[in-house]
Every structure is written in structure tokens, then in C-alpha cells.
Amino acid sequence: MNAGANEFLIAGNGAFVYDMQKKEIIYKNYIEKQKILEIIKICEENSIFYNIYTPNEVITKTLAWDSLFYNNENKKNPPDKKININITENIYDYVQNYKKDDFLKITICDNDKSIFRGIMNKLRKIRNIDVLDVGHMSRKLIKSGTEEIEIAYFYTEITNKNVNKWTAVESLIKILGISKEEVMGIGDNVNDKELIEEAGMGIAMGQSAPKVKEIADDAVSDNDNSGVAEAIQKYILQ
């Protein structure tokens, strides 16, 4: 189903809203550079894998875990839809010399639960950032030739304070002059929690984390079985 959704784009887990017709950012809540450098230092000192996201690129040291998955997905996209994955050895220096101040989020990955929990506790001591509370392991499949390989890791996202998909949607609600009861929020992970809770209709995808299904008004099929189309057909078109 083609919903013809070509007016607004919410990205970076809600860090900015882009007007696709005017080609301009109409809402933003970025992490300041000094916070990014502080987080990088903690990750480097504890040998933790991390990536940094801006509106234009993903900055990483190597292709592993989530960056490996996105790089694999990138191969399927047409040239104008590809994500720029920038591999650089010294991320600290790269960020320090970065000309813009448009950092959306940092993702942290590790396959050892105790190490992952330890780094999250350190990150939570930093003021004015939000650390996504994830209690389960992320599992993704990537294709290598004719084989499918599973990559599994603990994963969290760090954003500026009060960044989530719902706050971004709220900015659109004001622009469009509608009420939150007219909004349907669809998601599958803990970073969709506020969206599903606050929207007039909250929908969990079939592959959703258990916590997400508990707070949703309804559940639909998973991504591979047109769950979003199912929700639109059920609650909007009918």
C-alpha cells in the first residue's frame, strides 16, 4: 500500500521534523557537541562500540552490530536513498573538528549484558541527556550470499533530553491544528513507547517487544506481513 505520505519526515528518534515540501527542518532537539565528546570519551575508555548519527551520516569506527545491519540494508536502497556511513578511526577528533552542531543521537552496542548495563549506568550520570532503557537483546538477520546470519547484541540510544517520537509528533499536531485523539502511533520497540501511549490510537507491530504490546490499544502483523498497511486499512480507510 502506498499511503502517499510525502509531507513530513520525523527522524533521529524524534530529534527533528523535516518539511518535505518546503525542504526545511521545522523542529529540532540536537545533542550539543560537548555532550557528544563526553560520551565518546566514556565509550573509548570502556572499549564500548558506538555510532553517532547526524541528519546526513552515520559515523562509526567499523561495520559491526547495528552499523553492519544498516550497511547491509543500504545495499538494497537506490543511490538517492542510501545512508552515508562514514568509517573513521578517530571519532573524537572527527567530531571535535565537525563544522555543524546537528548531532541526533548516539547508539551503544555490546553483546555482554553486564558490560552493557555498566556503561548505561555511567551514561545516566550525564546531565540533560536521555538513555533509552532497553532490557532485551536486539536480534537481526543479514544476508551473506544465500545464507542468513543472525547478529545479536544489547543496544541503547542516547539523545538530548526530552527527545522521543511523541514530542516530535506534538510539534506537528500544533502546526496541523489537530488533536492527539486524531493521531495513530505505530511502533515495535521501547523507543516508540511515548508515541504509542500518547496517540489517540496506539498500535504495536507483530514483532514488538512485550512491553510495547502491553501498552498498545491493538496489535497488527509484523513488518514482513504488511502490519502498517493492516493498521491503516483497519483504523483509517474503514
Image (spheres, helix red, strand yellow):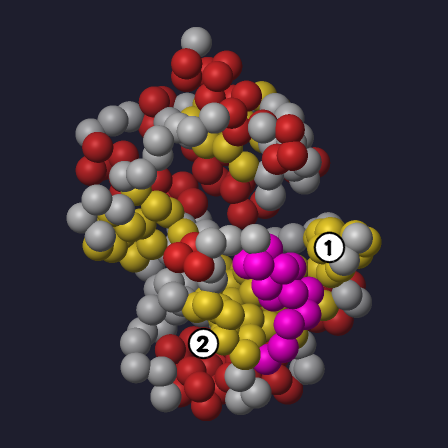
Q: Earlier in the sequence, mark 2 or mark 1?
A: 2
Q: Which of marks 2 and 1 is in front?
A: 1
Give the left or right position of residue 90, taking residue 5 as reference.
Answer: right
Residue sticking out furthest to the top: 238
Name the spot of residue 94 as percent of width and height, x first: 44, 86
Q: Can residue 133 be seen in this view?
A: yes
Q: Does the magenta stretch include residue 214?
A: no
* Residue displayed at 43% across by 9% down: 238
Q: At 30% from the left edge and 42% from the top edge, which residue is drawn?
A: 8
**Label 1: few (<14), some (14–19) or many (≥20) C-alpha neighbours in 10 Å:** few
Relative height, residue 210 to residue 60 (above, below): above
Q: In which quarter of the image is residue 70?
A: bottom right
Structural crowding at the residue carrying mark 2, measured as other residues with C-alpha within 10 Å and reported as few (<14), some (14–19) or many (≥20): many
Contact, CB < 8 Å: mark 2 with mark 1? no
Magenta-drawn segment: 61-75
Query: Which residue is labeled 2 in the image?
Result: 36
Depth order, front residue of 106/230: 230
Task: Give the amino acid at mark 2.
Answer: Ile
Marks 2/1: CA distance?
32 Å
Q: What's the residue type where badge 1 is placed?
A: Lys
Residue situated in front as seen by the camera: 159 or 93: 93
Where in the figure is residue 106, as x and y percent of width and height? 51, 67
For residue 87, above or below residue 12:
below
Along the viewing direction, whichever of 225 and 65 lies nearer the viewer: 225
Question: Would residue 66 be seen by someone viewing this image from the given angle?
Answer: no
The residue positioned 41% from the left and 63% from the top of the image is 104
Mark 1 secondary-structure assignment: strand
The image shows residue 182 at horizontal and vertical percentages of: 34, 22
Q: Is the magenta stretch mostly helix, strand or loop?
A: helix
Residue under pointer 1:
143
